[in-house]
Amino acid sequence: MTSAPLPVDQWSRPFGVLRLSLTARCNLACPYCCPDSEELPGLMSLDQQVRLVRVACGLGVHTLRLTGGEPLLSDRLLPLLQALARGRVASDDPLARLRDVALTTNGVLLTLDMAEALRAAGLDRITVSLDAIEATVVATMAGLRGGMAAGERLVQQVLGGLRAARRAGFDPVDGGLKLNAVMRRGLNDSQLLPLAELARNLGVELRLIEYMDVGNRNGWSADQVLSSEEMTQRIGERWPLQPMPRASGATSRRWSYADGRGRIGTIASITEPFCGDCNRLRVTADGKAYTCLFASKGLDLHPFLHSEQALESILREIWQQRRDRYSVERQECSVSTPHAEMAYLGG
């Protein structure tokens, strides 16, 4: 690694977070994501993944989020965590700069054995996704056949995954375990208060995500968006909320319950864009780098993955040329352009 200054983009935003997708496959078929049934060709090798994370850390990355598809379907997940953990304890390795390694999962495969293995391999945080409590709504949101029975089974699997994560040592009090929900008006907005109540009872923070225009398959329209303001208003009428300070680079605004029983966060890229301090680079499982969740195309990193020097040079160039702020400019766009699919980018 060179001793050159850490890169900033065209809006003076530093490089701080790497979101690395491990697979485009998923065992659910959520309609806002629309995952593929088959794996992408040309997946990065374990050595390439480790090299990528190491170089990114040398350029300022302090947080790694592992995504999919469903990352628990990847046979490279545990080996990658173990390799990163070895570097994180070496004082002369850029990987030692990693303060936080997190995972986003639908929770279906999050057994106690898996949760304990993830913890032992060095994972710091887990976010589990669940978009409803009512069985029929769950089935719809997850794209499941089988109606109520399939929905009930999924809810029990996810709740089991949350319990397994807690038993394995992922502590919701310090943010080690969170619950995500994508809210879509007219589809699962009836589940807002039940989800909030579930999270309060479990003692985990609930993060509510506005339905976003990511990809080209999900039929997004603005009237389907349940805004952050409306979500917090509805919850606050039931359980009063107090705003919390927003950290620099954070995707969510956060509130605590006035009665002290937990917190919620909202990710409002539609109604309250946070592009101004976005510090994230996304890399797909097949090695394409995207500088924005709403980007139309990425840069294939494969020609540069053979060496740290080549990789450092291209990542620095990518970041220094970056000027994305799609959420801010969305209203100014007169022509809709294709976006990369959510299943590839991992959110």
Image (tube, rainbow, N blue to C red):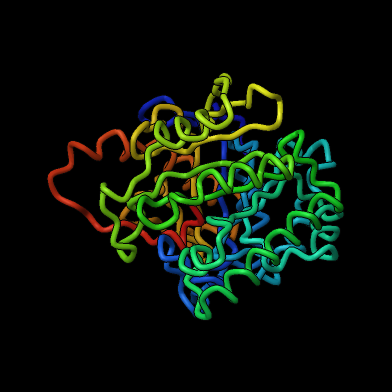
Q: Is residue 150 left or right of residue 47?
A: left
Q: Is residue 250 left or right of residue 271?
A: right
Q: Is residue 57 left or right of residue 40?
A: right
In this view, the residue in front, 280 or 199, is 199
Look at 65% across and 49% down and name the residue there.
127
- Residue 41 in the image: x percent, y percent? 49, 76
Look at 76% across and 50% down and name the residue there.
123
Vertical placement of residue 212 versus 98, above or below: below
Look at 41% across and 44% down and name the residue there.
210
Vertical placement of residue 136 versus 309, above or below: below
Quarter of the image holding residue 125?
top right
Vertical placement of residue 162 versus 251, above or below: below
- Position of the N terminus, as image quadrant, is top right
Q: Is residue 46 left or right of residue 275?
A: right
- Residue 193 in the image: x percent, y percent? 54, 43
- Residue 325 in the image: x percent, y percent? 33, 36
Task: Report whether residue 27 is seen.
Answer: no
Residue sitting at the far left: 334
Task: Report whether residue 160 is seen.
Answer: yes
- Residue 179 in the image: x percent, y percent? 63, 47
How many labels sit on residues?
A: 0
Vertical placement of residue 81 versus 253, above or below: below
Quarter of the image holding residue 153?
bottom right
Look at 40% across and 56% down and name the residue there.
299
